Amino acid sequence: LATHWILSSPPEKSTSELQSELSSILLSEGQIRTALAYKALAEHDLERAEEHAKLAALNDPTHAQPHLVLAKVTIARVVDFVRGAVKTSKTRSELLDEVEREARLAIALAAKQNDVTTQIESYEQLVDTKLMQHDISAAADELAEVVKLSPDNLRVLLVQAHVQIEKD
């Protein structure tokens, strides 16, 4: 219930406000931390999103979602880096390697949980990473894996179109 409350909260209600309204017992739950991480990511508060996702992964190491959030946070950092909006001690290549590690971990954990949605979203991060690395062949390989999961899924079809555009 608290997870839905966080995810459906109005945009003007910040992550820190939501966190302050939760008990320490609820904050020890991985799903609550994951929801706070998604909320912070939506606010583009990447540090807070990363903090909540890492705590979620510690609280529930078998759950894939925190690793997917970490991949998305790092993709956002890459985009910010490329735009010149932020300086970082890591190179673009190091950030993309981090996205790949987190996405692959999310895929492995989601597969154990039979969570196809998280697998698809994680593959989407991998394909984007490969395209950012200008490795269209590797992007096509990742695409082939996600197509096996759900060939008619709209997200999969959009990723497929994205790779095809890059090929052309």
Image (cartoon, rainbow, N blue to C red):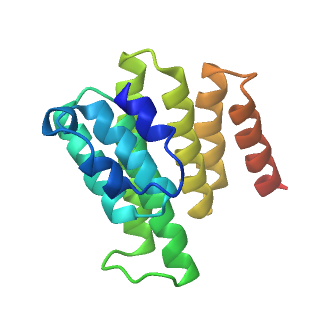
Work out whether residue 26 or residue 91 is closer to the camera in this orientation and state it: 26
Examine the rendered structure and indicate whether residue 43 appears above or below residue 72: below
For the image, the number of numbered tags is 0
The image shows residue 35, relative to residue 118, as above or below, that is: below
The quarter of the displayed image where residue 63 is located: top left
Choose between 151 and 6: the one closer to the eye. 6
What x and y, as percent, mark residue 32?
Answer: 31, 35
Relative to 72, 90 lies left or right: left
From the viewer's side, name the closer residue of 49 and 68: 49
Residue 9 coordinates in the image, percent (x, y): 49, 43
Quick one: 145 or 46, which is closer to the camera? 46
Specify whether residue 29 is in view. yes
Q: Position of residue 28 (x, y in %)?
A: 17, 35
Q: Residue at x 60, y 20 (%)?
A: 149
At x 59%, y 29%, the residue is 145
Q: Residue furthest front?
A: 21
Judged left or right of residue 166, residue 105 is left
Question: Which residue is rendered at x = 64% and y = 49% of the image?
Answer: 137
In this view, which residue lies farthest toward the right? 168
Q: Which residue is depicted at the point 33% across and 55% down?
A: 17
Q: Quadrant of the C terminus?
A: bottom right
Q: Is residue 100 visible?
A: no
Q: Is residue 22 left or right of residue 144?
A: left
